[in-house]
Image: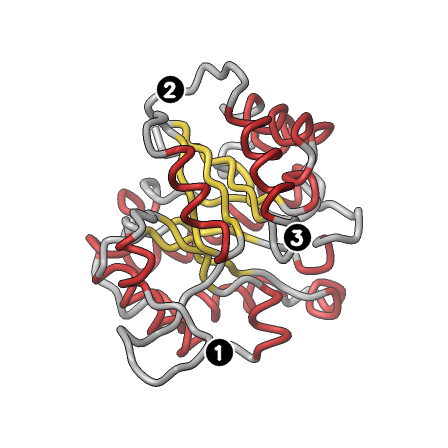
């Protein structure tokens, strides 16, 4: 079975003390996580070492960075390299979140370079794709997200592709309280898998976890995750509330 993943994206929130309290609250609870289920906390850079120390002996629970740079090292003041992340034991990094694309003009090509260096350092990228509201209203979301995959992923070989997690984000549903229906999520995530299959074959496509990200919360997680092509969620606001995120973890199939 594909990996089923509950990934928390804390974004630019919480003080160190608040972050420690939230993480302790969530990870101290009893979960019956099996070998195909994973929990990932994407925390702000200053909290990576703290979070990694807390989870390093826990099974099925990991820490992710929310971003990285596309170069190994150098005169890039303010940036963080995958080599730095690897030295902390970080195993995941979020790549191409819609906020990075929108506010920092990260292109599909730039994200392809980030994917390459993550894979070189054996860090699993959680690659984000998804359409804004105007694209959804125009009915061209399939072509839009297919191009994101083609431009950023299709240079990879089959082995490399299967080391990536994809997170589909309907941008119009992030932080708005709007959520794609479970049927809408299933429809486009099945389409994404078909795009991968067209290039790499259905067997490879079936091995890739595709998460849903867009106002996932405790009340809708189970229905969303029950869809055959929804392999968990990339969770924003609800991941900052211990009870909410714990319930989302327990909704994994």
Of 15 and 242, nearer the camera is 15
Foreground label between 3 and 2: 3
User: Percent from the top left, x then y, of residue 32?
Assistant: 45, 14
Name the residue that disc number 1 marks. 107
- Taking depth in this image into account, of 251 and 90 the one nearest to the observer is 90
Q: Is residue 110 left or right of residue 134?
A: left
Q: Is residue 157 above or below residue 164?
A: below
Q: In the image, what residue occupies the spot 71% across and 41% down? A: 181
The answer to whether residue 175 shows anywhere in this view is: yes
Which dot marks residue 34? 2
* Residue 140 x, y percent position in the rendering: 64, 67
For marks 1 and 3, the one nearer the N-term is 3
Q: Quadrant of residue 117?
A: bottom left
Task: Report crowding for label 1: few under 14, some 14 to 19, many 20 or more residues within 10 A (C-alpha).
Answer: some
In three-dimensional space, the C-alpha distance between marks 3 and 2, rounded to whole angstroms, equals 30 Å
Helix or strand or loop: what does disc 2 sit on?
loop
**Residues at badges 1 and 3 in contact (C-beta under 8 Å)?**
no
Label 1 vs label 3: CA separation? Answer: 25 Å
| Secondary structure of the residue carrying numbered label 1 | loop
Tell me the mark number nearer the camera, choosing from 1 and 3.
3
Q: Upstream in the sequence, badge 3 or badge 2?
A: 3
């Amino acid at each position: 079975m594909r990996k089923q993943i509950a990934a928390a994206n804390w974004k630019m929130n919480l003080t160190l003390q608040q972050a420690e309290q939230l993480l302790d609250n969530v990870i101290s609870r009893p979960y019956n996580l099996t070998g195909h289920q994973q929990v990932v906390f994407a925390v702000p850079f200053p909290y990576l070492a703290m979070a990694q120390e807390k989870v390093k002996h826990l099974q099925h629970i990991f820490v992710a960075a929310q971003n990285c740079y596309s170069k190994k090292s150098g005169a890039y003041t303010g940036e963080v390299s995958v080599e730095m992340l690897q030295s902390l034991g970080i195993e995941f990094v979020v790549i191409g979140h819609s906020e990075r694309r929108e506010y920092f003009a990260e292109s599909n090509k730039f994200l392809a370079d980030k994917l390459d260096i993550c894979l070189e350092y054996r860090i699993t990228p959680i690659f984000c794709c998804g359409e804004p509201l105007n694209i959804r209203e125009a009915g061209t979301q399939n072509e839009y997200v297919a191009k994101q995959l083609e431009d950023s992923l299709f240079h990879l070989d089959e082995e490399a592709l299967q080391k990536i997690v994809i997170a589909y984000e309907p941008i119009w549903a992030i932080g708005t309280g709007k959520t794609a229906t479970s049927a809408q999520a299933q429809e486009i995530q099945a389409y994404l898998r078909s795009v991968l299959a067209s290039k790499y074959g259905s067997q490879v496509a079936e091995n890739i976890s595709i998460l849903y990200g867009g106002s996932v919360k405790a009340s809708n997680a189970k229905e969303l995750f029950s869809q055959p092509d929804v392999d968990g969620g990339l969770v924003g606001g609800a991941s900052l509330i211990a009870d909410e995120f714990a319930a989302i973890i327990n909704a994994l199939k």
